[in-house]
Amino acid sequence: MSNVSLAATIQSAFNLSGGVELNGIKIEGEIQPGDAQKFYVELKKDNFEKTTIFLRSLGGDVEEAIKIGQIIRRLRLTTEVPTRFDSINKSLDLIKIDNETNRVCASACFLIYAAGVERIGNLIALHRPYLPQEQAKTISDVDYIKLQNNMLNTIRKYLEDMEVNEFYIQKILDYNSQDFYLVSPTDTAIYPLDNMIPSIKEVIISRGCDPVTSHQILAADRSPSRSIPRYLEIAKENRWESCSFNALNKIRAEAASRELNNLNKSSKSISNKAAGGVKLPWIIIIMLIASLFIIIFYRFIKRQEKL
């Protein structure tokens, strides 16, 4: 994608008309160093209760995008981008944005999207990461390739950890920085992307939710007499949707609680260190007084010996 210049806005998301605040945060514009900290502060305002991150960005800083993604995964949040149908000109969006050119999730934005435990939407553009031209001009081709390979290895490891299908990782490698691969609805149907990640789905199943399996759907479709009525399948799907929704909210509440506990521990640690810093001068004073007492006692003994 082409270079972007507008810094990201990180704030509460609103519906298309701008009249209703949603239970989520919007990240719109170029991702720059420091945005992960801004994002974390925005989340902390509501004690980590906002659950959906709406992404509208042409990309930006890879390292910062990964930091944001790690926060999202730690808090078990949902990521959302516009939904594309049969062409780039036909897509569905849910939120109000400041700049229409940001109505996509491209390049480094995909790294943030990948972090969602539940991913919604598919208007995504993929390509290789690259160094800014100002930096690239100062190094040799050998150093450039080495740096890019290191970056690609980092991205691959990160996306594998985020449970992203190899198909999308390969598309990142295949398309140069001035080109892009636009993910299609067919892609996401064949190579799952815009759904709940497998590991979290397993956790939810372990908590008593019963999903409709692909085997059950296939058996129902092949049954000539429709021995498994469709309405029963729909009922089971609805039970799964309701159960998984509630289970995921509990998982998020647990994650938010862990985060708040860790923050409290960090605050106490900082306070203890500060307190330790205050105690140090008193220790020195006590040692000086003890030394002075020893000197006075020694002189007293010497004087007694002379007498």
Image (spheres, rainbow, N blue to C red):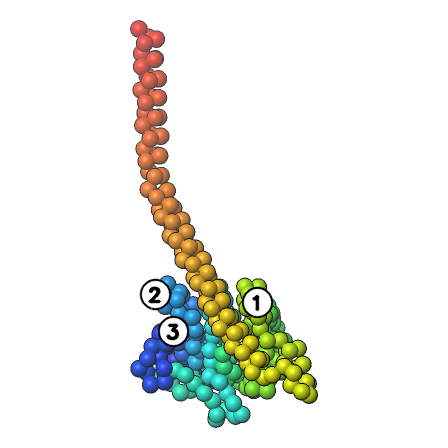
Q: Nearer the viewer, residue 11 or 235?
A: 235
Q: Residue at x 42, y 55 (%)?
A: 261
Give the image location of residue 240, x and y in percent.
53, 73
Q: Callout 3 environment at 10 Å: few (<14), some (14 to 19), or many (20+)?
A: few
Q: Quadrant of residue 174?
A: bottom right
Q: Which residue is mark 3?
A: 23
Q: Looking at the picture, how far across and down is residue 1, in whole percent? A: 50, 84
* Residue 45, disc: 2
Neighbourhood count class around disc 1 (C-alpha, 10 Å): few under 14, some 14–19, many 20 upward: some
Q: Position of residue 33 (x, y in %)?
A: 43, 69
Reading the image, the residue beneath label 1 is 205
Viewer-proximal residue among 129 and 155: 155
- Residue 114 visible somewhere in the drawing: no
202, 167: nearer the viewer: 202
Mark 2 secondary-structure assignment? helix
Q: Which image quadrant for residue 300?
A: top left
Please report whichever mark, 2 or 3, sits nearer to the chain's N-terminal start: 3
> Image point 32% across, 25% down: which residue?
292
Q: CA distance from mark 2 to mark 3?
A: 13 Å
Q: Residue 133: where, in percent of width, then height?
A: 50, 78
Q: In the figure, 230 relative to 210: above or below?
A: below
Three-letter amino acid code at the position of disc 1: Ile
